[in-house]
Amino acid sequence: MAAAAASFFKCMLLVLPLCLLLPCGNSDFFGETTAYLNVPAAKFERAVESTAAQLRQVISTISKFSAETSGGDLRLSNALSNCYDLLDFSLDLLNSTTQLVTSRNPSRKDRSSNEKYGSFEMMKNVKCPLTVNPETCKEGFDAIPDNNPVKNSIFSQLDSVATSAQKLSAMVNPNYLTTTQSKIRRGRKLIGDHDHAQFPDWVKPHDRKLILEGAAASITGVDAVVAADGTGDFTTIMAAIEKAPKNSTRRYVIHVKKGVYREYVDISKHKWNIMMFGDGIDATIISGNRSKTDELSTYRSATFGVKGRGFVAMDMTFENTAGPEMHQAVAFRSDSDQSVVYRCAIRGYQDALYSHCHRQFYKECKISGTVDFIFGHGTAVFQDCQITARKALPGQKNTIAAQNRDDLLEPSGFSFQFCRISAEPGAGGSTPTYLGRPWKIYSTTVVMQSYISGDIRPEGWLEWNGDLFLDTLFYGEYGNYGPGANLSGRVKWPGYHVLNESQASQFTVTRFINGDGWLPSTGVNYTSGLTY
């Protein structure tokens, strides 16, 4: 068992994004050679085209069934609508991602290493549109009988998409990251650097300025003002979102003034680079109370959901007030790649924060809930956040993280750094609370350099179902402190690890979400390595 654990840990280090250890060639990324692929580029392109055709076929089938069931079974109608939205989003992601990778226009050879690297990361994210979204689509059919012909037809086609996705992923050469990484990071200190006042690289300088201005409550160049009392341009958030341009490469800034906004916000895939800021956590509140029912999926229960890439939220609260008795009820859901949530509160109970997919960064946030209240397939770093377990239903157990990575060779996981983890008064004693449990086979969660209160059980982690996934999950702790950080009583699972400095560095902003490549543009302060 110990040998298996050691082998798994070694494998994990080899496949974690941005830190792969094997050598690779130095062929040009956009040239005729294919260092980033295991197959000729033409074969990869054909595979992409074939998979896209399968997605279009499923979408066509869903459209046909939707027309036939219009005005009929509400459960089926909602499941079909949910599935259509997810797969349509998948098709867009697949097309935009692979266009960058398969382009061999010589005029693009002068791109910088950072741009090449970012494009490769986007291509790696085909995992989300081809496996995660279809699985979420299936979850929407939970209340539909298994013998339903519509369900069976769609599921059969989705299984074919999943098979194609596995073949497509196998064509990617993960070792290419090593050479690219060395080009991008040469001369940069990854551990122990003091760049707390900087932002991840994917945050552009203009966005950095906007966020820093927001911190000073003086953002200039606001595009829209939302005010519930009628003193702004709009009285609802969705009205302001609808006015935002589609596929914009510049920030569209929305100021949501003080007030409680009882509405459901869904930022579509076409609304890129939305920046939304409020008047403070306790001042600007977006509130809803939907929950999973026979007619509504967990995904669709969200008070606030965002798909458009590059989303930034600041100084506001997202809440779901359905209560613990309503079980799954999402307050905030994100599919937004390279998104930032800064100085916000996310309040709910079970399934409060749904990090559904892609790279996300949460900074100085207050996140509270009960069962699996931070969950999903996202690749997310939580830095300087207050994580608070609430009182759950009698007999329930609180788990903070339920990450659902299901493929060893793809980037996904949660990293908590410099956080404060505790339970609200009265909750710790009545509800056993754990750091996390494994939703899927390669569930990945790391807690490091954080305060852990005595409200957390000595075992630290909770199984999902007996010994299921205990030898394949990856849970780690590093440098934590507080009465709940004592490791002597921790679980002895093969997949649980006490990390050393080198291992922990793989889960920092720089290495885990390539934050130095996109966060600087947002202006949010962050720590790239293991120290402030």
Image: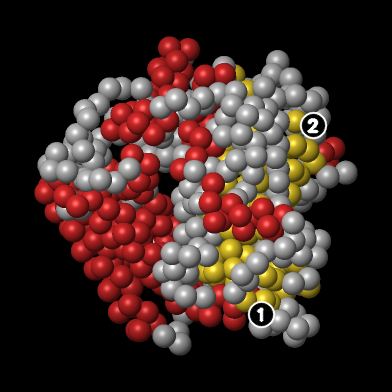
Residue 94, picture quadrant: bottom left
- Residue at image position (75%, 24%) is 481
Q: Position of residue 277 (x, y in %)?
A: 67, 64
In the picture, measured across the screen, residue 63 lies left or right of residue 260, that is left
Above-or-below relation of 466 to 364: above
- Residue at image position (19%, 34%) is 27
In the picture, measured across the screen, residue 229 lies left or right of residue 133, that is right
**For marks 2 and 1 on the same chain, the one whose residue lies earlier in the sequence:** 1
Amino acid residing under circle 2: Ser
Mark 2 touching mark 1, by CB under 8 A?
Answer: no
Amino acid residing under circle 1: Thr
Residue at the outermost right position: 425
The residue that disc 2 covers is 453
Residue 302, picture quadrant: bottom right
Q: Give the total of numbered labels.
A: 2
Above-or-below relation of 39 to 142: above
Q: Residues within 10 Å of mark 1 (few under 14, many from 20)?
A: many
**Quadrant including the C terminus:** top right
Could you say which disc has been placed on residue 33 in the image?
A: none
Residue 531, picture quadrant: top right
The CA span between labels 2 and 1 is: 39 Å
In this rendering, does residue 264 appear at all? no
The residue that disc 1 covers is 236
